[in-house]
Image (spheres, helix red, strand yellow):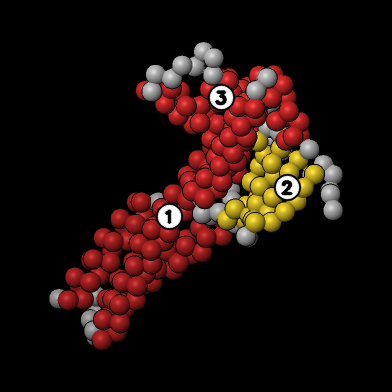
Amino acid sequence: MMNWPWLIQWRWGQRSFWLHWSLPIGAALAGLTYQSSDAVLAYLLIIGAHLGGHALQARRRGLTVRGFEINGLGGSTKIAGPISAWGASAVGSGGVLGQLLLWLMVSLLAASLDWSTESSVFYAGLTQMNLVIALLNLIPLQGTDGYAIWSLPGAALQRLGEQLNSFEMEARQAQRAEWQTILNATNDRDSFRSVRSSASHATSDTQTLDALRAQVEADLVERDARADAGIPTETAQLAEQLLDSVWNDNKE
């Protein structure tokens, strides 16, 4: 059963295919423009390169290709899997990139084989017609390759922001681990001090150390709640000096 605007729908293995009404019209226009069946063959190769570019970009990002929607300007790829805004824009731009790669390969092949291109309809289709279709795909309309391509700068900025946030979170986690190590050290030294409780000079140091540990714990809780920049470096240095002093005093 036809489902407009798709003329034909079929499955091949695990993939589904949808054929848009604009594809046969595009093939007919290519044949009429160049008055040759070679132009139709070139046109179909261009469509294949376009879809292949989408599929390769999706596979590069670990996505599963579920099917293809084929239309007169190339089409799109149905994918499955989590994808970011940057990934979606990159996959969307793959069609035009596939066409440009085809254009480059044909041009290099013609130059290396000394291909007589002036009267070759097949060559003209793979180069001239290819570039025309690529330009049409650059029109920034919703749901088109052009929309995905022109959204690449914004997606790139968003990706950069996500990476910076990731670096910031890693720095916070590293700082928290450092302060947790200090807290663990104070607990270990408290245990040592309880064994040496007869030392008269430990009283004031114990009170100061307990106050410092309480301050550190409060700072950690407050920082986690606000997700702020963390505890000042000066406080960390003061804590290390005080802890070293208490430890050395108790060893005497």
Please name the amino acid that badge 3 sits on: Phe
Above/below status of 57 relative to 224: above
Rounded to the nearest angstrom, the CA distance separating label 2 from label 1 is: 45 Å
Relative height, residue 137 to residue 70 (above, below): above
- For marks 3 and 2, the one nearer the N-term is 2
Q: Dividing the picture into quarters, in which one does residue 114 lie?
A: top left
**Residue 58, numbered label:** none
Q: Residue 18, labelled with which disc?
A: 2
Q: Is residue 122 left or right of residue 201?
A: right
Can the viewer see residue 157 in this picture?
Answer: no
Q: Which of the pair 198/111 is nearer the observer?
A: 111
Q: Secondary structure at mark 1?
A: helix
Q: CA distance from mark 3 to mark 2?
A: 27 Å
Horizontally, residue 43 falls left or right of residue 10, namely left
Q: Nearer the viewer, residue 4 or 155?
A: 4
Residue depicted at x 30% and y 82%: 191
- The residue wearing badge 1 is 170
Q: Is residue 129 left or right of residue 143?
A: left
Q: Earlier in the sequence, mark 3 or mark 1?
A: 3
> Mark 1 belongs to which amino acid?
Glu
Crowding at dot 3, Cα within 10 Å, few <14 / some 14-19 / many 20+, comes out as some
Instruction: Compute the Cα span from label 3 to label 1.
Output: 55 Å
Q: Which x, y percent locates residue 228?
A: 51, 52
- Mark yes or no: residue 74 visible: yes
- The x, y position of residue 173, in whole percent, is 43, 59
Residue of label 3: 122
Outermost residue, left side: 252
